[in-house]
């Protein structure tokens, strides 16, 4: 009787794009891992516009298991969007993301959850002994992990691992675009979160093909620039643009002064001086950067108001009057 009213504790979100042969095995393994927790759970499969039989297979799975939900997207939107759709529809206190291709191992989920319960907000899987191509996968990924850790200040060994566990409040405050699902720990860091890492297993892909090639690296690097900007300057863009602008304008101005001195006091011709070009360029650039910064300030205000995004996140309020 009580179990009916019980609130969902764990939501597992699985992005699916042409994975027909993996889904039944995955569902079996997930159910085994989750049943042992003895808490109410749901498994949300997000069909990201598959063109094979994935959706039919999912429907069959759903018939035999009430904890399964399916979200079918209209077309292929990409892994980040699929995850995002799943996150938006999950009810659990704890949300787990996992790949559909059986490369992540569901029996690792309980260890992620118990780590989260120790008081962390995100627990990131770290694919220990990763089973992927060395040259096109492991090397770019090692560089990317180092770079992302260095630039965002959140040091993780394996940003690219989909197997992660989150508290639901964390995801509520994060909006995802581009290839950004891998950056959630970094994007969320602005609100002050505790991130932990847990070593997880990794298997080779048996059925179906990987959906990505080496070109993903470039997209990830571009997203990194966005993420850094969002974390550090989204509420004060003028401070970064203005800094460059100010320095550039100042150097140009000094050069201009010096040239004016030569022209007016020393009465030398300055028309043929390359320095003149540099002075004009630097001052021009400086003015451009500063006005760009002002525009960005206005954009940032519209952005924060349009999505009703606060510039802070509260953990709790202790006040008898506040309900
Ligand atoms: N995926 C998706 N939409 C896409 C590409 C991939 O939902 O457009 C899913 C895919 O089905 C898998 C996961 O994202 O569950 C990871 O994809 P993949 O295994 O191809 O990436 P890799 O492990 O090679 O990095
Ligand atoms: Mg994979």
Image: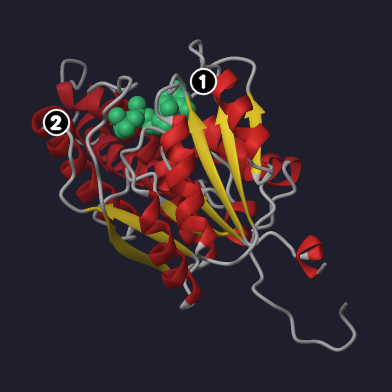
* Quadrant occupied by the N terminus: bottom right
- Which residue: 46% across, 60% down? 189
Colour scheme shown: secondary structure
Rounded to the nearest whole Å, what is the CA distance between mark 2 and mark 1?
A: 26 Å
| Image-based side of 184 in relation to 66, left or right | left
Residue 248: x, y in percent?
32, 40
Determine the quadrant in which ligand 2 lies.
Answer: top left
Mark 2 and mark 1 residues within 8 Å of each other at the beta carbon:
no
Residue 282 seen in the current view = no
The residue that disc 1 covers is 54
Vertical comparison of 140 with 278: above or below: below
Q: With respect to residue 215, does 165 lie above or below?
A: below
* Disc 2 residue: CB within 8 Å of ligand 1: no
Q: Secondary structure at mark 2?
A: loop
Residue at the location (41% across, 38% down)?
99
Mark on residue 229? none
Q: Determine whether 106 is above or below 62 in the image.
A: below
Pointer 2: residues within 10 angstroms few (<14), some, or many (20+)?
A: few
């Amino acid at each position: 009787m009580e179990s009916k009213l019980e609130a969902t504790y764990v939501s597992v979100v699985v992005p699916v794009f042409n994975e027909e042969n993996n889904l039944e095995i995955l569902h079996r393994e997930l159910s085994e891992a989750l049943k042992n927790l003895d808490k109410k759970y749901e498994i949300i499969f997000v069909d990201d516009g598959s063109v094979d039989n994935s959706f039919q297979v999912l429907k069959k799975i759903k018939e035999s298991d009430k904890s399964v939900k399916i979200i079918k997207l209209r077309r292929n939107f990409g892994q980040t969007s699929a995850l995002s759709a799943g996150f938006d529809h999950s009810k659990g206190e704890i949300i787990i993301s996992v790949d559909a291709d059986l490369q992540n191992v569901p029996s690792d989920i309980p260890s992620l959850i118990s780590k989260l319960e120790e008081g962390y907000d995100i627990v990131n899987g770290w694919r220990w002994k990763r089973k992927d191509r060395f040259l096109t996968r492991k090397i770019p990924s090692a560089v990317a992990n180092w770079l992302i850790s260095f630039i965002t200040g959140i040091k993780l060994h394996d940003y690219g691992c989909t197997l992660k566990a989150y508290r639901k409040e964390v995801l509520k405050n994060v909006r995802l675009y581009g290839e950004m699902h891998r950056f959630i720990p970094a994007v969320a860091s602005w609100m002050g979160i505790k991130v932990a890492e847990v070593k997880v297993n990794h298997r080779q892909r048996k059925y179906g093909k990987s959906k990505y090639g080496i070109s993903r690296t470039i997209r990830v690097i571009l997203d990194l620039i966005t993420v850094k900007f969002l974390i550090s300057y989204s509420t004060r863009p003028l401070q970064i643009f203005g800094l460059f602008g100010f320095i550039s304008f100042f150097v140009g101005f000094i050069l201009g002064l010096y040239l004016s001195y030569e022209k007016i006091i020393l009465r030398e011709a300055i028309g043929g001086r390359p320095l003149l070009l540099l002075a004009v360029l630097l001052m021009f650039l400086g003015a451009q950067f500063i006005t760009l910064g002002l525009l960005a300030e206005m954009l940032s205000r519209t952005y924060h108001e349009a999505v009703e995004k606060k510039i802070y996140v509260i953990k709790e309020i202790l006040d008898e009057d506040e309900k």
